[in-house]
Image (spheres, rainbow, N blue to C red):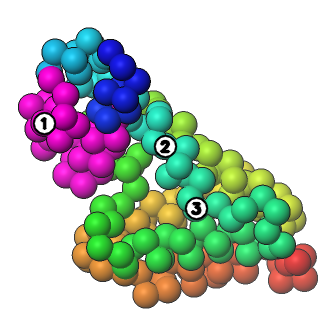
Amino acid sequence: MTSPTRERLLRAAADLFYAEGVGAVGVERLCQTAGVSKRSMYQLFATKDDLVAEALRVHGPGVVAHYFPPEDADLTPRERILHVFGVLEDQAGAPGFHGCPFANTTIELHDASHQASRVAWEFKLQLEVYFQRQAALLGAPDPRQLGTQLLMLFDGASVRAVMRGGGLDGVATRTAEMLLDVTVSRQSLP
């Protein structure tokens, strides 16, 4: 199989699974959208589960990186954390926002040990570690716990936006600010 065939399948899988859900998208529809035969798909991926996991693995880095400010951005750790929530706020109000593809996949699969759920968790962990690193730079007494709390806030805000079918109206960012203020003394904030 040619690389473009694989790329088309992975792109179609990532887009369709995000927009409609893993279970709602059958192999027939996936292949039709990608413009490949089922035979070609099964030559590249033994199962649909393999395709789900690989689509996350290939397209996940772009999803995560989209939330982070550039490394060379002149931002304080607090501003770097709030940047993530600002991006979420912007996305949540946009048409086609369906929440977090990693959380969506794991929730739909109902199996934390599924290969796609494990891949999804690896990407969620990248966001949590990012929060923890920034929290440590802020001087948080327990950066690990603050990172976990921020990830929970991120996930909850994402779900709220999907359930309401609209934006977050600044609530996620304001809640992150409050959490940072309560957790890290104002004197140690840069």
Q: Position of residue 140 (x, y in %)?
A: 81, 64
Q: In the rendered image of this protein, does residue 40 appear above or below residue 102?
A: above
Q: Earlier in the sequence, mark 2 or mark 3?
A: 2
Answer with left or right where residue 34 lies relative to residue 189: left
Specify the amino acid type for callout 2.
Gly
Whether residue 170 appears in magenta in the rendering, the answer is no
Q: Which residue is mark 1?
A: 32
Dividing the image into 4 quarters, which one contains the C terminus?
bottom right
Residue occupying image coordinates x 83% and y 83%: 186
Q: According to the image, label 2 marks what residue?
A: 60
Mark 1 / mark 3, whichever is N-terminal: 1
Mark 2 to mark 3: distance in Å?
Answer: 12 Å
- Measuring 26% from the left and 70% from the top, which residue is drawn there? 163
Quarter of image, res 82: bottom right
Q: Is residue 145 visible?
A: no
- Of badges 2 and 1, the one in the foreground is 1
Report x, y in % for residue 92.
39, 73
For residue 180, the mark is none
Q: Residues within 10 Å of mark 2 (few under 14, many from 20)?
A: many
Q: Is residue 69 left or right of residue 105?
A: right
Given the image, on which type of amino acid does mark 3 rest?
A: Tyr
Give the SS element for disc 2. Answer: helix
Identify the mark nearer the N-term, 2 or 1: 1
Q: Mark 1 or mark 3, which is nearer to you?
A: 1
* Image x and y of residue 95, in percent: 29, 73
Residue interval drawn in magenta: 10-37
